[in-house]
Image: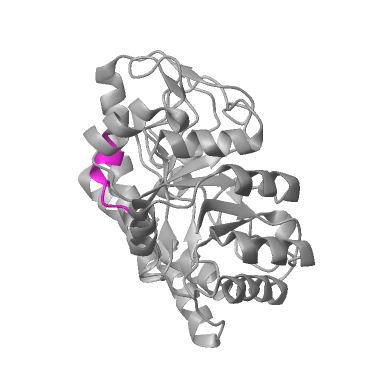
Amino acid sequence: MLPVIFGLSGACLTADEQAFFRDANPAGYILFARNIEHPGQLRALTDSLRNLAGRDNVPILIDQEGGRIARLGPPHWRVWPAAAAMAGLSDSPASTDLDRAIARVQCNYEALGLELAAMGINVTCAPVLDVPQPDAHDIIGDRAFARTPEAVAALGRACLAGLQVAGVAGVIKHIPGHGRALSDSHESLPRVTASESDLAADGAPFIALADATMAMTAHVIYEAWDPGHCASVSTRVIAEQIRGRMGFDGLLISDDLDMKALSGDIPERAAAVLAAGCDIALNCWGRLDDMNGIAEQVPVMTAEATERLARACAPLRVAQTCSALNARIDALVARRESLA
């Protein structure tokens, strides 16, 4: 198996993509707006990916956080709130406020997960566990649940729990923490100069949720840990911080290889994140030349990564749209609103 999650070029598999994916046997796939037209088309696409892989629980990912990060939306799908708006917490919430926010978040993500499962999508790249700082770039902003590590951890746990009930996995991100970045890693390489003690606070939600089955790395340099490499390509950060101090032993996925924070061509970037200790390289854009180059350059998946993938995928399931499922989603949304 190839330790890569690939994107697709359009709303259905091309003949060239089918041939390539059949030969390469990637770990999974990720979908974007260019792959989505309407529910019937989307379910047919995800069914074709499962048939091609020969694995009913092949991970099919999407960025469906809610708010400004949502690949599914009207008129065919619901609007989901941003994490911060749904949590609705002050910087120092009372315990009863946090309890209500936890209940809201769990209802919301169970409903969101059921909507994804009906489309054959079984992984969403959420929750964001970053703790945003006042002077940071707004790339995180309202994607974060709260501004304290304790609240972020509690609400992140509720998100994962809701998704799990729906048969969908969440991907915690951006480990070891993107909340202090002064720039957007899509556009440039952020460099964080914070002390180790400050970084330890940022990492607290990831430690609290270290039993999550999947995590996504940050393309961010942390000078206190490795001034020469961003986390995604840093053997030191992955081994000493993510796997070591934070104790994360799930499937570690790089953030998108195409982001400008990384250097080198796309196959070189894939090889670099895997060499540093990521289990999976994430290649989102569905460009066949890049995908062929990656397949030629990266090794097969390690036994350790294969075991982590199997563990992460074991509980995944898809659903069929029906009146009962829609009624359940509506009831969960109504429950979420009643807790506001």
Q: In this view of the protein, can residue 63 be seen by the observer?
A: no
Position above or below: 150 against 105: above
The question of residue 232 being in magenta is answered with no
Residue 211 falls left or right of residue 45: left
Position above or below: 162 against 211: below
Q: Image point 70% across, 51% down: which residue?
A: 286
Q: Nearer the viewer, residue 242 or 131?
A: 242
Q: Position of residue 304 (x, y in %)?
A: 33, 52
Q: Which residues are magenta?
A: 204-212
In the displayed orientation, state which residue is furthest to the bottom: 323
For the C terminus, give its image quadrant: bottom left
Q: Nearer the viewer, residue 149 or 222?
A: 222
Q: Position of residue 108 (x, y in %)?
A: 43, 61
Q: In this view of the protein, can residue 182 be seen by the observer?
A: yes
Q: Position of residue 242 (x, y in %)?
A: 31, 36
Q: Nearer the viewer, residue 258 or 162?
A: 258
Q: Nearer the viewer, residue 51 or 122?
A: 51
Q: Position of residue 94 (x, y in %)?
A: 23, 42
Q: Image point 57% across, 28% down: which residue?
A: 185
